[in-house]
Image (tube, rainbow, N blue to C red):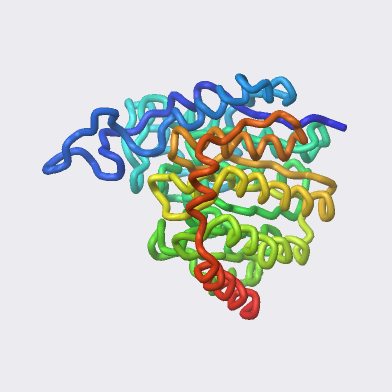
Amino acid sequence: MNRTGFFFDERCLWHSGGNYAFLAPVGGLVQPLAAGGLPENPETKRRFRNLIAVTGLAEELELRGAEPAGREDVLRVHPGAYVDEFKRLSDAGGGELGLRTPFGPGGYEIAALSAGLVKAALEAVLRGDLRNAYALSRPPGHHCLPDFPNGFCLLNNIAVAIEAARAAGLAERFAVVDWDVHHGNGTEAIFYERGDVLTISLHQERNYPLDTGEFNARGQGHGLGANLNVPLPPGTGHAGYLMAMERLVLPALSAFRPDVIIVACGFDASGVDPLSRMMAGSHTFGAMTQMVMEAASDLCGDRLVMAHEGGYSELHVPFCGHAVLEAISGSAIRAEDPLGPRIAGQQPAADFNALVEQRIADMVSAL
């Protein structure tokens, strides 16, 4: 059986942001932070990569790099005017095109490399070179609309990869399961009128963006029914996430019958993430991964690709990522989560879980 691929390039960690203090631009009454910058920073990813090296898990993976996505790849998703302006500012030393999406010199090339990692991972799995794969991509991509970057995302990595795979004749039906804690508005917008790409987003309700992610947004035209939003209330914990997966996500995948499943794998639903109010643990991400692996086994010959998105706890992201890699690789190597007991002790009480269960039941009955 082919191995699990892990796609990574150190240059992606050299992507730089602007002069921010967390989410606010520095200036006026906003004082610079000692560490500086946006919550989206290289350390969560670097520490993830370091952890799998230290535990020995990296030795069980097929470690690969990738070429950047080419201009032709990017133009299948993003209009030429946007791509040209992004490249112009990048060549001129950097800038900012959208909402909280600053970049420095070479920002375009790094974003293209991030998309290239996801593209290469998807192609390798579809060609049968790898059983499944994880792309440690940065900058992330799921918030990027065709012509408007936002939420730290400059190119839509997964959309670029899907369109490249389609152009190469590698697959026809794609399913995207996005469990980043923020709504995957960019991926939704790109495929909203398409019936050949199923987009599913589990997210904290009204976290980011504030005006998207409602359950009743089900797609349009040929895409009607091919978009599923699962907005979960703040505080949803391990049990609620698994319930949403079991009752909403897995049935949607089964009905759609994709050729491949792609997970927009954000770890910002973590119980200690600074940008969310959810209570997922590393074991939650491991369990959800097992669920999509079983779906991929039943529906599409095990073809599964994970693309890294958000997650802003430098301590916890590596352990969440390790749990995912343990699952997709079948490794016996474990990394004990130092926050596991704390997050387990903070899980919602039975009465709150009952409210979450009712919310999920209402969504199921409305489909």
Q: Is residue 59 above or below residue 173?
A: above
- The residue most toward the left is 28
User: Which residue shows up at 58% across the image and 53% down it?
Assistant: 178
Q: Position of residue 177 (x, y in %)?
A: 63, 54
Q: x, y percentage for residue 93? A: 32, 26
Left/right placement of residue 348 relative to residue 172 reads left
Q: Nearer the viewer, residue 163 or 25?
A: 25
Q: Is residue 41 left or right of residue 202?
A: left
Q: Where does residue 279 sit, x and y in percent of width and height?
A: 49, 53
Residue depicted at 68% across the width and 47% down the height: 289
Vertical arrangement, residue 126 with respect to residue 64, above or below:
below
Residue 256's image quarter?
bottom right
- In this view of the protein, which residue sits in the foreground, 363 or 309? 363
Image quadrant in which you'd find residue 173: bottom right
The image shows residue 185 at horizontal and vertical percentages of 49, 57
Quadrant in which the N terminus is drawn: top right
| Residue 58 seen in this snapshot | yes
